[in-house]
Image: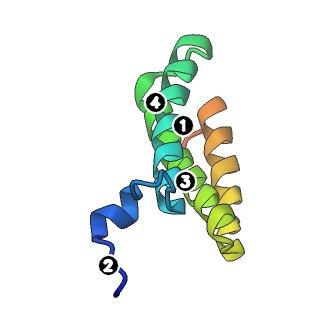
């Protein structure tokens, strides 16, 4: 008997055995982080919505890559920890991102 081949969507979402691939956890963690962190920054830290959303979009993507790297044992991707920390720092204390010459 030949093994049944997995489709592309089954690979990303998982199979009926509730075993999920690492991409699923990275993707879910990324969106969960974004959905929770933006309202927290806006409501409790008083940061404007656009600045919180832009910083946390980068931070959430970085966190998703970090989760994926840990679950799939691709430790070279852990360099995204720097990006995650910098995006959190920018979200908490937004500074101008460009130098203006007069």
Q: Are the two marked residues, 2 and 4, in contact with CB atoms closer than 8 angstroms? A: no
Is residue 31 shown to the viewer in this render?
Answer: yes
Give the number of the mark in front: 3 or 2.
Answer: 2
Residue 35: assigned label: 4
Q: Marks 1 and 2, how far apart in space?
A: 33 Å
Q: Are the two marked residues, 1 and 2, in contact with CB atoms closer than 8 angstroms? A: no
Q: Residue at x 40, y 58 (%)?
A: 15
Give the mark, 2 or 4, whose residue is nearer the N terminus: 2
Q: Are the two marked residues, 3 and 1, in contact with CB atoms closer than 8 angstroms? A: yes
- Between residues 81 and 50, which one lies in front from this camera angle? 81
Looking at the rendered image, the quarter that the N terminus falls into is: bottom left
Give the mark, 1 or 2, whose residue is nearer the N terminus: 2
**SS for tag 4?**
helix
- Between residues 79 and 47, which one lies in front from this camera angle? 79
Q: Residue at x 53, y 51 (%)?
A: 25
Q: Position of residue 31 (x, y in %)?
A: 45, 40
Q: Marks 2 and 4, how far apart in space?
A: 34 Å
Q: Marks 3 and 2, how far apart in space?
A: 27 Å
Q: Position of residue 43 (x, y in %)?
A: 53, 12
Q: Residue at x 70, y 48 (%)?
A: 85
Give the residue number, with chain letter if any, for mark 1. Answer: 33
Give the mark, 3 or 1, whose residue is nearer the N terminus: 1
Q: Are the two marked residues, 3 and 4, in contact with CB atoms closer than 8 angstroms? A: no
Q: Marks 3 and 1, how far apart in space?
A: 9 Å
Give the residue number, with chain letter if any, for mark 3. Answer: 64
**In the image, is 11 to the left or to the right of 88?**
left
Give the residue number, with chain letter if any, for mark 2. Answer: 5
Q: Residue at x 49, y 20 (%)?
A: 39
Q: Quadrant of residue 77?
A: bottom right
Is residue 97 shown to the viewer in this render?
Answer: no
Give the mark, 3 or 2, whose residue is nearer the N terminus: 2
Q: Marks 3 and 4, how far apart in space?
A: 13 Å
């Amino acid at each position: 008997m030949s093994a049944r081949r997995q489709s592309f969507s089954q690979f990303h979402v998982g199979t009926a055995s509730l075993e999920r691939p690492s991409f699923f956890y990275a993707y879910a963690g990324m969106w969960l982080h974004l959905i929770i962190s933006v309202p927290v920054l806006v409501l409790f830290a008083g940061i404007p919505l656009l600045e919180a959303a832009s910083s946390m979009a980068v931070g959430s993507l970085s966190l998703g890559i970090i989760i994926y790297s840990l679950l799939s044992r691709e430790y070279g991707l852990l360099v995204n920890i720097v990006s995650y920390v910098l995006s959190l720092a920018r979200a908490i204390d937004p500074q101008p991102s460009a130098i203006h010459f007069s």
